[in-house]
Image (spheres, grey):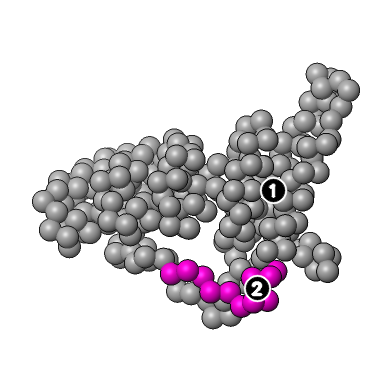
Amino acid sequence: MRKQFLPILFLLTSGGVLSGSALAAVTEPQTPPPPAPPLSVAPQAPKPLKLTPEQEAALVEVRKILREASEVPQGVGTTNPESKEGKLLEGSKFSVLQSIAAGQARAGDIEGALRTNESTKYKGALGDIAVAQAKAGDPYKALKTASTLNLDVDALQVIIEALASRGDLKTAREVAESPGMYLRKAPALAYLAQLQTKTGDPGAKETFQRALEVAQAFDKLD
């Protein structure tokens, strides 16, 4: 039975799950949900994904395989870690563990992903874990997991939308001002200002003005 899950394991650890439809039979319902709203559209609270019993069983098996896989590199070592070969081995081990942790996050095993990531030297899967936490409806844990300075623009956007769906526009604004937002900072601010207007927030005008300033600043760089 395990053999049929090996392609799934590869896709999860290689980062292809979130961007494609290769794992649709396991992680998505047979009728795909509509895409997430762009920054110009007010978000709605995410609806829980409904899986068939077969899909749920397959996902549980994938999580189990990934947990078992995370234990394998732990036993790999060398008698001379300071040698060239020893350093290469350690680097490879941490790279494998980081990929497994990212796969666990994408598979929804956040607890397992955190544990695996903790065993790596550079803890490079924190961004994937933060995104998984935000998509699961807990952007505050996501912000505790990874500093905004270490998150890429796509991860930050997921967190902003999750915060906005909870009505926390203040924290969403702070994240939108993160250096990592870069070219998407202006549309993110305009999006939040739009939500402020709908809720009667008097700060909407100032947020719109800030969005305009950011956009004009980028125009001057061209």
Label 1 or label 2, whichever comes before in sequence order: 2
For disc 2, the marked residue is: 55
Q: Residue at x 36, y 65 (%)?
A: 45
Asked whether the viewer can see residue 216, the reply is no
Q: Position of residue 173 (x, y in %)?
A: 28, 46
Tell me the amino acid under the disc marked 2.
Answer: Gln
Whether tag 1 and tag 2 are in contact, CB under 8 A, the answer is no
Q: Is residue 153 left or right of residue 63?
A: left
Tell me the amino acid under the disc marked 1.
Answer: Ile
Asked whether the viewer can see residue 160, the reply is yes
For disc 1, the marked residue is: 100
Residue 22, image quadrant: bottom right
Which element type, helix, strand or loop, lies under badge 2?
Answer: helix
Q: Position of residue 221 (x, y in %)?
A: 32, 39
Provide the residue span drawn in magenta.
Answer: 47-58
Where the N terminus falls, by quadrant?
Answer: bottom right
Q: Residue at x 19, y 56 (%)?
A: 196
Q: Is residue 215 left or right of residue 27?
A: left
Any magenta on residue 57?
yes
